[in-house]
Image (cartoon, rainbow, N blue to C red):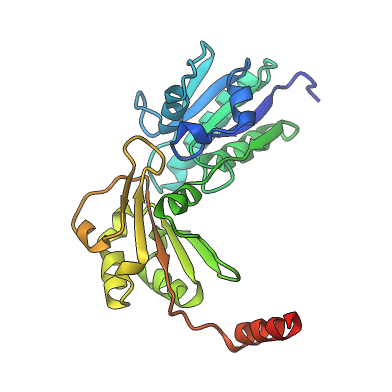
Amino acid sequence: MNNNLGTLYGVSLGPGDTGLITRRAWDLLTGSGHWTYPVRKKNSDSYALDIALRAGLELPQAHTALHFPMTHDAEILARYWLEAAQTVLAILQRGENVLFLVEGDASTYSTFGHLQRSVRALQPEVTVEVVPGVSSFHAAAARSGEPLADVDDTIAIIPAGYGIEQIERLLDDFDTLVLLKVKPLLDDVIDLLRRRDLLDQGWFIEKAGAPEERVVHDLASLYGQKVNYLSLLIIKNPGRQRSEMQRGCRKKKEISDD
């Protein structure tokens, strides 16, 4: 066992507002760790790195971009995950701590989960610490002015890529539906909400917390528009019919409270 291994940190930076970087993340980023950050194309910008730099942090001399291409091809992804894990492990084996910069929260639909599994597959004893952060949908709810959940409301959070049929089913089952990465299906979702008479129950938030943030309540106005990859929809369904069991539990609780 190599006792000189560094620690791998998943450093959550929040969705874009530099004021949402936690004290723990700040302490690590101003320390001596080796920064790594994801890029979608070689030599392209990193949104996670941009958040850190806009916060006034300086890019340390020890930094490495890790390439994670935008593809669903499992073979291609596996090759790049292995390459990234080997790069990170080589740094850890020198006794250096590695900070992987993450937009949003490192445990929520993040590339960090894949990275830590890939590194530990190569060397299981690597120590990993996840620094939690503000997720995009929490920041988006704050900007919309509406709570994600109230009292005993239920919430579903999914990538919009699950498809319209799944989204419609979830609208029947949950009081609040958060759709992440809505860009490819935005028009289809708007059509669904129009058919369900829910267009005025939604909020579109693009790049929540960033200087380019956009919040739109008039969802119909977005039809046919090109939107950023970092965008989401929060949909409320006030007319959702709860099951008899749920209504019975609520009635029982009201009686006991009396």
Residue 24 at x, y = what percent? 64, 30
Percent coordinates x, y for residue 39 in the rendering? 41, 31
Given residues 254 and 71, the one toward you in this image is 254
Give the x, y percent position of residue 117.
Answer: 63, 40
- Name the image quarter holding the C terminus: bottom right
Left or right of residue 55: residue 206: left
Quarter of image, res 245: bottom right
Residue drawn at (68%, 34%) of the image:
129
- In the image, residue 69 above or below residue 60: below
Q: Please determine whether, in this image, residue 13 is positioned above or below residue 174.
A: above
Task: Kindly identify the residue that appears in the image at 33 percent across and 72 percent down.
Answer: 198
- The answer to which image quadrant residue 242 occupies is bottom right
In this view, which residue lies farthest toward the top? 61
Q: Residue at x 41, y 49 (%)?
A: 72
In the image, residue 103 sits, relative to residue 60, either above or below, namely below
On screen, residue 78 versus residue 46, left or right, reads: right
x, y percentage for residue 29?
58, 22
- For the N terminus, the image quarter is top right
Residue extending furthest toward the left:
224
Numbered label tally: 0
